Image (spheres, rainbow, N blue to C red):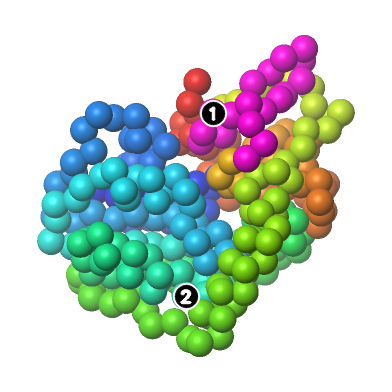
Amino acid sequence: MLFYFTGTGNSLYVARQIEETPISIPQVLHQENLNFKDEKIGIVYPVYAGEAPQIVLEFLEKATFETDYFYLILTYGKDVTDAPECIARLLEEKGRHVNYIHSILMVDNYLPSFDMNEQRTMDKNVEQQIQQTLQDIQNKKEEIPKATQAGRDFHASAKEIFVKNPELINGEQIMVTDKCVGCGICTKVCPRGLFYVEDKKAKRKQNTCEFCLACAQNCPSKAIITKLKDANPNARYRHEKVSLKDIIEANQQV
């Protein structure tokens, strides 16, 4: 049994290499029964500046897992910091033992800092990383990677910046421009269902969100930008082996 959260397809792609039919966290959260039992249970999710997405933390808070082997796969684009160490400690504090955590370096899709066209050209040996991870899981490897001090320091400094400037990470940056044609794709890919279309233009129910950037990355008109800074407003990213239909099926809340 494998659960995942994705905005641009990276984590879904990884999850599919491990299990044929992984389960979407935004969809399963609507179930009344969040008690799961299997020989192995895993979760694949993206790291946001060293942190797990809020929707993943909500799932971990509400769900219970009965398994002999519980593992986490973290996808990231630049620096995983001490994210594996932190999530393991958080879960242990809640009485949940994690057997294995591994991180996979992929395209960094944080639009304010990275040009998606440049990211696409980088060879990050994703397939080799996935194969090693898959082998580890099949062998029920036990490992929680220990962070470097540099990773801990980077995470700590990022947290300090975001406390002082929450708009950098809480979704306030997202803006719908006049390019919007009211197609409604954003209403279907937002894992919190925060978009709606009114007078042929997309609008949001609130200014804060997961900041997963599924709306901006999957907008066919590139009409959704990060207003404080957008490294390249003409370049967007979705994993080449994940379709828009896949993202909609994973995240649609309406």
Q: Residue furthest right?
A: 178
- Left or right of residue 233: residue 139: left
Check disc 2 and report its element: helix, strand or loop. Answer: loop
Check disc 1 and report its element: helix, strand or loop. Answer: loop
Measured from the top left, where is residue 53 in percent x and y? 49, 52
Front residue of 109 and 55: 55
Residue type of the residue flagged with mark 2 = Asp
Residue type of the residue flagged with mark 1 = Gly
- Contact (Cβ within 8 Å) of mark 2 with mark 1: no
Determine if residue 52 is in view.
Answer: yes
- Left or right of residue 39: residue 79: right
Q: Is residue 194 magenta?
A: yes
Name the residue carrying label 2: 82
Determine if residue 124 is in view.
Answer: no
Quick one: label 2 or label 1, which is nearer the N terminus? Answer: 2
How far apart marks 2 and 1 lie (CA) works out to 30 Å
Measured from the top left, where is residue 88 in percent x and y? 33, 68
- Tell me the quarter of the picture where residue 209 sits: top right
Magenta residue span:
189-208
Q: Residue furthest top?
A: 199
Measured from the top left, where is residue 46 in percent x and y? 50, 57
Tell me what residue is drawn at x 44 percent, y 63 percent: 74
Q: Is residue 114 above or below residue 34?
A: below
Front residue of 118 and 52: 52
Bin the neighbour count of mark 1 within 10 Å (Cα to Cα): few under 14, some 14-19, many 20 and up. Answer: some
Front residue of 140 and 76: 76
Front residue of 157 and 32: 157
Q: Is residue 145 above or below residue 113?
A: below
Tell me what residue is drawn at x 78 percent, y 33 percent: 176
Q: Is residue 16 above or below residue 90?
A: above
Q: Residue furthest front?
A: 164
Name the residue carrying label 1: 193
